[in-house]
C-alpha cells in the first residue's frame, strides 16, 4: 500500500507547483536546447511475487511466504534533457532510491525479508512536447530503462532462519511518461511528471553457498516528480 506519510512531501510539491503554474508567464528569451530539472520524486514500487523459481527451503510450499510488498520512498532527482527539435527531446534521469521488501501474506506476514535495497533506475525517454499559450508545454514520452541493483541484504529476521546472503538481479524494462513544463521567465520553469515502469527482478536467498529460495518479483513502480527547471 502507498505510505501516506512518504507521499505527503511530493503531494505538497505538486500542489505548490500547480498553483504557481496558474500565474506563470512564458519567458521572452529564445529557448535553449538543454534543460536541467531538479525534482522531488516519489518511487512507488509493487514488489509482488510473480513466480517461484525454486523453493529448497519449503518456505512457499509450507505457506510461510505467500507474497511480498516493496516499500515506497521519496528521493531527490536530477533530469537532463536535450531538445533535438523545438517539440522533440531526449531525457535521462539520475537518482538512487532505497527500499525494503516485506512478506505481505503467509505465516511470516509482516516480516521484513530483504533490507537496504538500493536501486538506480537508469532511464532514457524520447518525448514529444505540445506548445500551448503562456509557456505551457504538456508532453508524453517512452523509452528503455535499466534497474541497477547496487545493494541488498537479508533482514535480521531472515538471517535468524539461516539465510546468509540475498541477490536481486539488475533488469531491463520499459517506461512511459506524461507531464507538463511551464516557463516562468529567464530560462526557469516548473515541471510535473509521472512515469510508469514495467520491470522485474529475481530475488535469490542463500544459506552459505546453497540457493534455498528463488522468486520472480514485479517492481513496476509509479514514479511521480515535481520540481524546478532551467533551460539554456
Image (spheres, rainbow, N blue to C red):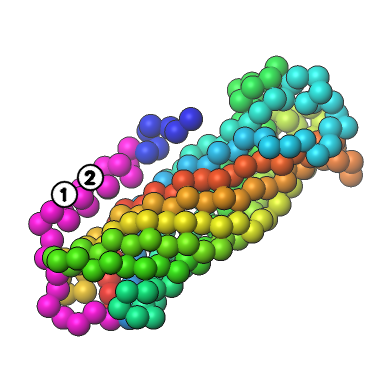
Disc 2 target residue:
15
**Place of residue 181 in the rendered image (x, y in percent of width and height, measured from the top left):** 27, 62
C-beta proximity under 8 Å, tags 1 and 2: yes
Is residue 126 something that shows in the picture? Answer: yes
Q: In the displayed structure, would residue 186 be above or below residue 122? A: below
Quarter-wise, where is residue 104 in the image? top right
Disc 1 target residue:
19
Q: Which residues are magenta?
A: 8-32
**Place of residue 193 in the rendered image (x, y in percent of width and height, measured from the top left):** 35, 55
Quarter-wise, where is residue 156 in the image? top right
Q: What secondary structure is found at the residue carrying circle 1?
A: helix
Is residue 189 something that shows in the picture? Answer: no
Quarter of the picture containing the C terminus is bottom left
For image coordinates 47% across by 56% down, the residue present is: 176
Neighbor class of circle 1 (other Cα within 10 Å; few <14, some 14-19, many 20+) is few
For image coordinates 38% across by 61% down, the residue present is: 140
Quarter-wise, where is residue 134 in the image? bottom left
Position of 115 with respect to 16 (left or right) is right
Position of 16 with respect to 158 (left or right) is left
For image coordinates 43% across by 32% down, the residue present is: 3
Is residue 186 found inside the magenta-colored segment of the image? no
Is residue 18 found inside the magenta-colored segment of the image? yes
Amino acid at each position: 500500500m502507498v505510505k501516506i506519510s512518504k507521499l505527503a512531501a511530493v503531494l505538497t510539491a505538486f500542489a505548490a507547483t500547480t498553483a504557481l503554474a496558474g500565474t506563470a508567464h512564458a519567458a521572452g528569451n529564445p529557448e535553449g536546447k538543454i534543460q536541467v530539472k531538479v525534482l522531488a520524486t516519489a518511487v512507488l514500487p509493487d514488489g509482488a511475487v510473480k513466480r517461484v523459481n525454486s523453493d529448497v527451503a519449503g518456505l512457499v510450499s509450507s505457506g510461510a511466504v505467500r507474497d511480498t510488498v516493496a516499500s515506497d520512498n521519496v528521493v531527490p532527482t536530477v533530469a537532463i534533457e536535450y531538445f533535438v527539435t523545438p517539440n522533440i527531446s531526449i531525457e535521462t534521469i539520475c537518482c538512487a532510491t532505497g527500499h525494503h521488501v516485506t512478506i505481505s501474506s503467509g505465516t511470516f506476514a509482516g516480516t521484513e525479508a530483504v533490507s537496504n535495497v538500493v536501486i538506480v533506475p537508469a532511464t532514457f525517454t524520447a518525448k514529444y512536447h505540445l506548445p500551448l499559450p503562456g509557456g505551457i508545454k504538456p508532453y508524453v514520452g517512452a523509452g528503455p530503462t535499466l534497474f541497477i541493483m547496487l545493494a541488498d541484504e537479508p533482514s535480521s529476521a531472515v538471517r535468524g532462519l539461516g539465510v546468509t546472503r540475498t541477490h536481486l538481479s539488475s533488469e531491463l524494462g520499459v517506461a512511459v511518461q506524461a507531464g507538463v513544463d511551464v516557463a516562468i521567465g529567464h530560462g526557469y520553469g516548473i515541471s510535473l511528471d509521472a512515469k510508469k515502469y514495467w520491470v522485474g527482478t529475481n530475488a535469490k536467498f542463500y544459506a552459505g553457498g546453497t540457493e534455498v529460495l528463488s522468486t520472480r518479483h514485479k517492481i513496476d513502480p509509479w514514479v511521480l516528480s515535481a520540481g524546478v527547471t532551467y533551460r539554456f
